[in-house]
Image: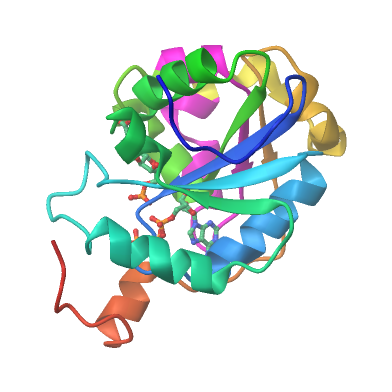
Amino acid sequence: MKIALPYVRPGQVVGLLGGSFDPPHEGHVHISREALKRFGLDQLWWLVSPGNPLKPHGPAPLARRMAACRALVDHPRIYVTDAEAQLGTRYTAQTLRALQAVRPGVRFVWLMGADNLAQFDQWQDWRDIIERVPMGVLARPGQRISARMSKAARVYSDVRLPAALSHTLGHSDPPAWCFVNVPMRAVSSTGLRARGDWPKSGRG
Ligand SMILES: Nc1ncnc2c1ncn2[C@@H]1O[C@H](COP(=O)(O)OP(=O)(O)OP(=O)(O)O)[C@@H](O)[C@H]1O
Ligand SMILES: O=C(O)c1ccc[n+]([C@@H]2O[C@H](COP(=O)([O-])O)[C@@H](O)[C@H]2O)c1
């Protein structure tokens, strides 16, 4: 399959930050910069989702969210991609399988905020995800305890990498995951939508 992705060499470590980005905000930029530093990533890709399978309402049109992401990101190693729309995948497990097939040898790392770890066991094939790629989890206000107590954290407690070794995550064999306590930003897309900073007109 021929799809347009950022250029990356086999052996390089690419962090994947999947999200609705409806709209993108400073919190996304902040955790991306932290993830690059803390997890020793070569690149970080924002995977702008066609739509979170667990959310009942569709987000704004993909083209609009992609444009907003591109306008916000200004970093030489952070790329914005609509890979899931190109691959025809929506569930993360499918996306990871497809990316590994089209970019063999690239070391992908799945990234997420602590709120997503808390409900990670509801994702499709969640065990396949954690067995397939290392996972980096970043602190989010109000979510640290629920993430640490989550089913995924408990079931995979023995393969949790200490934060002091976070920079080795990308070269760790899965299953492996690491929680880092980065400085936190309370911003969310929900908050921005509620403030009217991302008008509903044009939502899909
Ligand atoms: N302020 C933040 N701190 C830590 N992680 C964050 C923050 N904002 C977003 N994330 C993480 O970034 C990823 C993409 O987030 P998403 O696009 O859903 O934004 P959001 O602000 O969580 O949106 P919403 O409020 O609509 O749920 C998720 O893994 C989420 O946990
Ligand atoms: O695969 C799943 O079952 C699944 C369930 C919920 C969320 N996700 C992914 O998690 C990422 C964050 O989603 P969101 O909407 O919270 O930004 C995004 O890439 C979604 O596709 C994936």
Residue lying at 36% horizontally and 79% vertically, measured from the top left: 192
Residue 83 appears in the picture as rendered: yes
Q: Nearer the viewer, residue 139 or 26?
A: 26
What is the count of numbered marks? 0
Q: With 5 as the anchor, is 37 left or right in this view?
A: right
Residue lying at 43% horizontally and 15% vertically, measured from the top left: 127
Residue lying at 20% horizontally and 48% vertically, measured from the top left: 55
**Residue 170: where, in percent of width, then height?**
74, 27
**Residue 154: where, in percent of width, then height?**
52, 23
Residue farthest along the front direction in this orientation: 2
Ligand 1 rendered quadrant: bottom left
Q: Nearer the viewer, residue 51 or 139?
A: 51
Range covered by the magenta-colored residues = 127-153
Q: Quadrant of residue 191?
A: bottom left
Q: With 59 as the anchor, is 178 left or right in this view?
A: right
Residue 181 appears in the picture as rendered: no
**Residue 97: where, in percent of width, then height?**
44, 16
Residue lying at 53% horizontally and 28% vertically, measured from the top left: 153
Q: Please say which color scheme the image uses.
A: rainbow
Q: Is residue 203 above or below residue 32?
A: below
Q: Nearer the viewer, residue 4 or 197?
A: 4
In the rendered image, residue 13 lying in the magenta stretch gets the answer: no
Q: Is residue 105 above or below residue 16?
A: above
In the rendered image, residue 142 lying in the magenta stretch gets the answer: yes
Quarter of the image that includes the N terminus = top left
Q: Nearer the viewer, residue 118 or 5?
A: 5
Q: Is residue 40 above or below residue 34?
A: above
**Residue 21: where, in percent of width, then height?**
39, 60
